[in-house]
């Protein structure tokens, strides 16, 4: 058998050297913060004095902490309402933008712009003005003969403002759907027309089944994002009224920076991490992406 020698000047550690930046980065920015966060969650620590080991006390306190229980409920309510709505809006928009008409590239750009802007401070101020007592939303209601709504003072509507803002940022999800739609062969639709299949039936019989993997990926990504929601309720409602928009992300922020309770904040962040992991595992199980025979 012919024996091949290593190239001149190349040592056996070259591969390890090439991936060393990734290894070092993972240790410094992923593994080390994870370990530190878990250890801090087992202590009473205000960020100034030396941490005091308390074991699982922070986790036990969550079970009786009404703010934590309320935040978990709001986070799940937000996720359950928001994720299906965003998937539906993104998919329907992608279907409209998948047609080959003149100037379609311009419309795709326009629909994607909100995702670039995001929920930054300027957008948050604009959104707050839209839903004030004399804002454009109430002015539109008055034009059709309806009374204005106290969007920020009524806990029935406050969460709706946050959901609407995030729905407005559907561009990235739409692009993923649009790319998947372009991969579906046109021959399938042409054959369905020959068989007398209408547009609605073609959507449920051809488009939706072929998009199931893309739909699942978007559902997972949006679920993770929704469970970690922080910036939108923080900037627009501050968690009010009566904590109806107070998410777990806001609770972690307040415990860490307002109450200087770093130990409890890190413990809550680990619980949020575990909740997210369990929810995603359930989604994988329900869609059959985890084999039952795997232990």
Image (cartoon, rainbow, N blue to C red):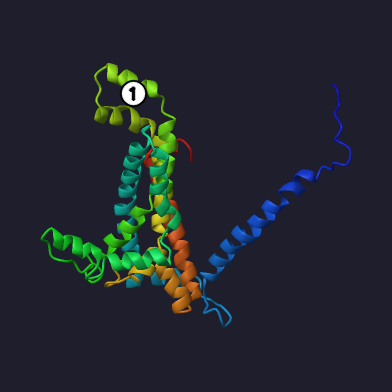
Image point (44%, 74%), residue name: 255
Query: On screen, 206 above or below 230?
Result: above
Image quarter of residue 183 = top left
Front-most of 54 and 276? 276
Looking at the rendered structure, the secondary structure element under dot 1 is helix
Residue positioned most to the front: 102
Label 1: which residue?
189
Image point (32%, 53%), residue name: 82
Residue 140 placed where, x, y %? 19, 60
Query: On screen, 250 above or below 167?
Result: below
Residue 188 placed where, x, y %? 36, 22
Image point (33%, 18%), residue name: 191
Mark 1, other Cα within 10 Å: few <14 / some 14–19 / many ≥20? some
Query: On screen, 120 above or below 115?
Result: below
Can residue 277 be seen from the camera position used here? yes
Image label count: 1
Q: Is residue 54 left or right of residue 83?
A: right
Query: On screen, 118 above or below 44?
Result: above
**Can you say which quadrant of the picture contains the N terminus?**
top right
Can residue 69 be seen from the camera position used here? no
Image quarter of residue 79 = bottom left
Front-most of 242 and 91? 91
Q: Is residue 294 left or right of residue 64?
A: right
Residue positioned most to the top: 194
Residue 78 placed where, x, y %? 32, 58
Residue 294 placed where, x, y %? 48, 38
Front-most of 135 and 11? 135
Image point (27%, 73%), residue name: 242
Residue positioned most to the left: 145
């Amino acid at each position: 058998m012919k024996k091949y020698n290593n190239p001149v000047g190349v040592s056996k550690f070259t591969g390890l050297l090439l991936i060393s930046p990734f290894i070092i980065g993972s240790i410094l920015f992923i593994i080390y913060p994870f370990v530190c966060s878990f250890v801090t969650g087992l202590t009473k620590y205000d960020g100034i004095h030396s941490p005091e080991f308390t074991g699982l006390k922070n986790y036990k306190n969550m079970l009786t902490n009404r703010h934590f229980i309320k935040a978990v409920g709001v986070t799940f309510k937000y996720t359950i309402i928001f994720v299906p709505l965003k998937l539906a809006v993104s998919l329907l928009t992608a279907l409209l933008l998948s047609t080959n008409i003149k100037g379609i590239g311009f419309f795709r750009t326009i629909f994607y712009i909100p995702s670039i802007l995001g929920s930054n401070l300027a957008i948050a101020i604009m959104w707050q003005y839209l839903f004030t007592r004399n804002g454009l939303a109430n002015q539109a209601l008055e034009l059709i003969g309806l009374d204005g709504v106290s969007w920020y003072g009524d806990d029935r509507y406050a969460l709706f403002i946050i959901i609407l803002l995030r729905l407005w940022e559907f561009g990235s999800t739409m692009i993923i759907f649009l790319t998947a739609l372009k991969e579906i062969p046109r021959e399938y639709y042409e054959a369905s027309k020959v068989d007398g299949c209408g547009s609605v039936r073609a959507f449920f019989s051809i488009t939706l089944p072929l998009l199931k993997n893309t739909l699942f990926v978007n559902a997972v990504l949006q679920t993770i994002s929704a469970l970690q929601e922080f910036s939108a309720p923080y900037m627009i409602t501050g968690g009010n009224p009566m904590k109806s928009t107070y998410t777990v992300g806001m609770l972690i922020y307040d415990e860490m920076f307002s109450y200087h309770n770093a130990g409890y904040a890190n413990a809550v962040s680990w619980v949020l991490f575990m909740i997210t992991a369990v929810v995603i595992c359930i989604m994988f199980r329900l869609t059959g992406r985890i084999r039952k025979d795997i232990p």
